[in-house]
Amino acid sequence: MPRTIIKDAVGKVGERVLVKGWVANRRVHGKIIFIDLRDRTGLLQVVFEPSKKEIYELAGELRSEYVVAVEGTINARPEKMVNKNIASGAVELVAEGLTIINQAKTPPFEIDKDTLKVNEETRLKYRYLDLRTERMNNNIRLRNKTLLFIRNYLSQEDFVEIQTPILSKSTPEGARDYLVPSRLHPGKFFALPQSPQQYKQLLMVAGFERYFQIAPCFRDEDARADRSPGEFYQLDMEMSFVTQDDILNLVEKMFTALVKKFFPEKRITREPWPRIKHNEAMSEYGSDKPDLRENKNDPNELAFTWVVDFPLFVQQTKEDFFYGAGEKYAPSHHMFTAPKEEDVALLDSAPLKVRSYQHDLALNGYEVGGGSIRIHDPKLQEKIFNLIGFSEEQKKQFSHLLEAFEYGVPPHGGIAPGIDRLLMVLTGQPSLKEMIAFPLTGDARDPLMGAPSAVTEGQLKDVHIRLREKDIK
Ligand code: ASP
């Protein structure tokens, strides 16, 4: 007999069905054994009556999380037994056959309860069990629906989804790179991309005009609740022949449609979203990601805010380890961001006064995305490199981009909202990790796979690396 999923079993009153799934829980009332069976579509109550001796005895062996197949007849429950909390609450399955497909050990935490309070190490070590819980399961499914929505939306707007390399070269976004040693090129390293920034600009030179990617980004930085160490996902976008307004309007329309579709209970504080100048945000709210909610206790309020007119540079500090040494300027966004036309003249006299075409998206006090109109003039790009204090050697690292710009580069710009971060705020989850299937711990480990891990001498030799004793003690 073919399997029926629980969602469909509900409509089959009086019919015989075969269902398969996990035992969510087991109760005995009087002499009757009840289990809630869980599959990907929901929960179904299954009844084992003592009169069917053989399967009744087998049902006595069932424990939580056993994997089973049950055959039986779907019955309508008597009115007063209807469970309004579950979609299949009006029916139950009276078991006539039972197969235990696989037993299960007692899980380290309760699967039918929210695991937010369970110790993180345990949750991540047994993530496959954590993901069985209703909240986590819903979060991951919501993430999938969101990505599908975005893909469809942008495809209809003529965007092309293009995957850019993971094994690549450092693209500075202000964090440390993850490095991968090369076997074939001793002493050389790939860097995992901090973002596809240079590739997406090259795709504009390539003439695609509208690109997006649900892009994995790798940054070796310390954890905070709204940052995940290691990798995270951005909705990376780039467009040619656009103004800053075009970019902001497109994102605003798309996310408003997304909220209306999947979060109808939410209220957007102000539409269109306010656009605030950086200096006003700082002077009025003391933050470049101001929280403009009217009622911060309302879990259903969403205050999207654009922040624009950022300064192009900040004074470089020692922490800007990437950039050139000396009393120079560090880009406030990244080094490909264009200065505002009316401020270009100030680049020579007062660089810290130059405003840029950077735009950040804030939501309820979190930064959920940033981007800019880019420089598309190789001479201006070189000037910025000089102001940052790049040596000739450092400039050479970007010569491919400058060279590409000599072959007909359209004006272009883009943005990259953080998917995990956006969903965290939309769903009101306390951390990014609640929206990621397999996140790292705060100190950048995966307790489930045991990563990072030591490798063999042979593997190290292959990639021409010898560890220093003092570093591994
Ligand atoms: N690459 C930038 C970032 O990761 C986003 C952008 O400028 O489009 O913040």
Image (spheres, rainbow, N blue to C red):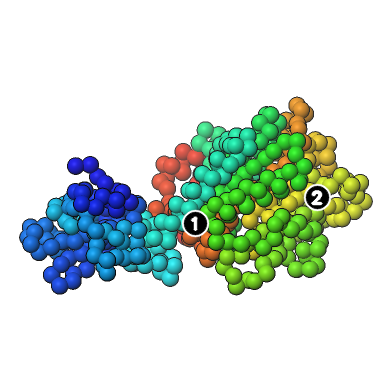
Which one is nearer the viewer's eye here, 351 or 429? 429
Q: What residue is shown at x 49% (from left), y 56% (from top)?
A: 435
**Label 2: few (<14), some (14–19) or many (≥20) C-alpha neighbours in 10 Å:** many
Q: Position of residue 362 (x, y in %)?
A: 67, 59
Residue 31's quadrant in the figure?
bottom left
Asked if residue 283 lies left or right of residue 61, the reply is right
Which one is nearer the viewer's eye here, 67 or 324? 67
Residue 58 to residue 205: above or below: below
Can the viewer see residue 249 in this picture? yes
The residue wearing badge 2 is 356
**Label 1: few (<14), some (14–19) or many (≥20) C-alpha neighbours in 10 Å:** many
Q: What residue is shown at x 62% (from left), y 52% (from top)?
A: 256
The amino acid on which the numbered mark 2 sits, given as a three-letter code, is Ser
What distance separates the C-alpha of mark 2 from that of mark 1?
33 Å
Asked if residue 443 lies left or right of residue 312, the reply is left
Q: Position of residue 30 (x, y in %)?
A: 15, 72
Q: Position of residue 96 (x, y in %)?
A: 13, 54
* N-terminal label among 2 and 1: 2
Q: Position of residue 360 (x, y in %)?
A: 71, 54
Residue 414's quadrant in the figure?
top right
Q: Secondary structure at mark 1?
A: helix
The residue wearing badge 1 is 435
Which one is nearer the viewer's eye here, 467 or 93? 93
Can the viewer see residue 337 in this picture? no
The amino acid on which the numbered mark 1 sits, given as a three-letter code, is Met
